[in-house]
Image (spheres, rainbow, N blue to C red):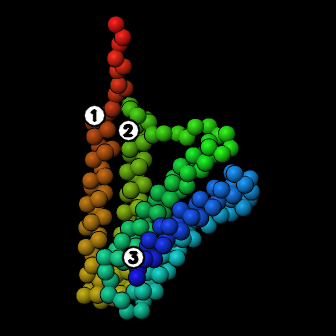
Amino acid sequence: MLIAVIAGCEIGFWVVLATGLLARYPLRLRRTGATLLLCVPLVDLVLLAATAVDLRNGATASAAHGLAAAYLGYSVAFGHSMVRWADEHFAHRFAGGPPPRGRPAYGRARTRHEWREFGKAAVATAVACGLLLAMIVLVGDADRSQALRGWLARLGAILAIWSLWPITHTLWPAKPKERARRG
């Protein structure tokens, strides 16, 4: 059941985001659009409440509970930048805004970008691990919370793998590609 709630929250995130952007740009209802965009985090509260209620009602923690914590952590850390990304694209498409910013392709700017994204991943991991630890305390039974402890290691492994991108861009920064010369 919790997997269905997670899927519903993911769908809800995109529906609320799209509705807010549609109101803001094509319909030109700026306040309504802004209000809807401010409601995007409420979707996360639904998932947090569903997870807490499920565990509080005596459910044995499962991979779904760990996935909910990971989803919430990454949503907290990356949600704002995802909304900004979508807003830039909508503004460009429907309101004559400037072209969306892409990620830098090379050099120090790319390295800074990779470290900034890694920082977000570190925040996501910290939030998710904090939620996992809170769930473990909430359950209060080592046998019923065993699945959650495994998620702590998984999230740590994901962060360790993620660190390879900024490290490699620091040690071997991407350089501009040379264009073939016409002769």
* Residue plotted at (47% across, 81% down): 50
Residue under label 2, please give it.
Answer: 111
Q: Assess whether mark 1 and mark 3 are in contact (beta carbons under 8 angstroms).
A: no
Q: Secondary structure at mark 2?
A: helix
Left or right: 82 with respect to 145?
right
Which sits earlier in the primary sequence, circle 2 or circle 3?
A: 3
| Residue 64 visible in the picture | yes
Q: Quadrant of residue 30?
A: bottom right
Q: Is residue 128 visible?
A: no
Task: Pick whichever of labels 3 and 1 is earlier in the sequence.
Answer: 3
The mark tally for this picture is 3
**Residues under numbered marks 2 and 3 in contact, where contact means CB atoms less than 8 Å apart:** no
Distance between the alpha carbons at the discs numbered 3 and 1:
40 Å
Q: Secondary structure at mark 3?
A: helix
Q: CA distance from mark 2 to mark 3?
A: 36 Å
Identity, as a three-letter code, of the amino acid under mark 1? Trp
Residue at label 3? 3
Q: Quadrant of the C terminus?
A: top left
Q: Residue at image x 59%, y 64%?
A: 16
Q: Position of residue 132 (x, y in %)?
A: 36, 75
Please tell me which of labels 1 and 2 falls first in the chain: 2
Q: CA distance from mark 1 to mark 2?
A: 9 Å
Local crowd size for mark 1, using a 10 Å CA cut-off: few (<14), some (14–19), many (≥20): few
Residue bearing the label numbered 1: 172
Answer few, some or many: residues within 10 Å of disc 3's Cα (few below 14, many 20 plus, some between 14 and 19): few
Amino acid under label 2?
Answer: Thr
**Is 45 located above or below residue 144 in the figure?**
above
